[in-house]
Amino acid sequence: MPWRGSLAVFTAGLTMTITPAKLGELLKCALLHRSYGVPVRRSAPVVLAERVTDASGVVVLALVAGAGTRSWPLLVAAFVGIGLVIAVVRSPLLDRLAFFGEATEASRTLLTTGLLVGMTLLSGFSWFCEGLAAYVCVRGLHLDLSLADTIVAFSLGSLAGAASFLPGGLGVAEASMTGLIRALGDVSRAAAAAATVLIRLATLWYGVALGLIGLVVEARIRPTDQGAAAPGRYPP
């Protein structure tokens, strides 16, 4: 599929960032099926791979920033969860479930070692950019918090929010970030809460707003003739 269409579909999926465990991002599968005739069973593993590398990327970033010395139980739990998902996908267990069809093989292809490492590095860079956005918020409020500590607070808060399975990790992520900002810097409760609100606006809710724009763009650029968009590539 064309890169513009891929970018538009990915961006449109950001509207579902606030759904539990980001499961609403399966919207991307529906958009791919509608616009390019891609079967959901073929595209759903992409969303799975995104979630796995989301977690592995933020864990790697948190470790680089020095979180391992402070909150290793959460990082170990995240690593175990990632490992379990990969082990299940690579095991013959799913072969017994015929209704998964080609989704099983697609998942295995996406979670091969080479692709997993590459996607994790790209995910880590993406999370680092969000950490920079968080640091801009912290510095804007003149808080005594280093870039590394800001990244640790943001990464671990995001992990805690994801582990809660609440929509967007709402409540859990904010409480975790506020507590970590206070613990890592000489910051009052009010200042830490203000920083957390700004950080969430600049990361989570900015992404949702961007996703709404992506939905409009995707609807405008999608092919009107589905057959011409993907001639014979995918079965109905």
Image: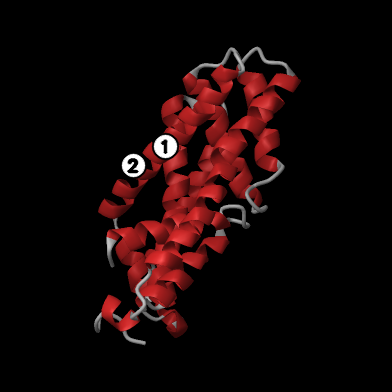
Residue at screen point 45% across, 67% down = 219
Which of 76 and 150 lies nearest the eye of the viewer? 150
| Drawn side of residue 164 relative to residue 235, left or right | right
- For the residue carrying disc 1, how many other residues have a C-alpha within 10 Å: few (<14), some (14-19), or many (20+)? many
Please name the residue that numbered disc 1 is placed on: 60
Image spot of residue 46 (x, y percent): 40, 63
Residue at screen point 45% across, 26% down = 65
- For the residue carrying disc 2, how many other residues have a C-alpha within 10 Å: few (<14), some (14-19), or many (20+)? some
How far apart, in angstroms, are the residues tagged by discs 2 and 1? 8 Å
Nearer the viewer's eye, disc 2 or disc 1? 2
Image spot of residue 39 (x, y percent): 39, 78
Please name the residue that numbered disc 2 is placed on: 121
Could you say which quadrant of the image residue 220 lies in?
bottom left
Quadrant in the picture for the N terminus: bottom left
Which of 79 and 213 lies nearest the eye of the viewer? 213
Instruction: Kindly tell me whether residue 235 is visible in this rendering.
Output: yes
| Drawn side of residue 113 relative to residue 145, left or right | left
Task: Check if mark 2's residue and mark 1's residue have beta carbons within 8 Å.
Answer: yes
| Drawn side of residue 159 relative to residue 230, left or right | right
Residue at screen point 53% across, 29% down = 134
Residue at screen point 49% across, 61% down = 215
| Drawn side of residue 123 relative to residue 185, left or right | left
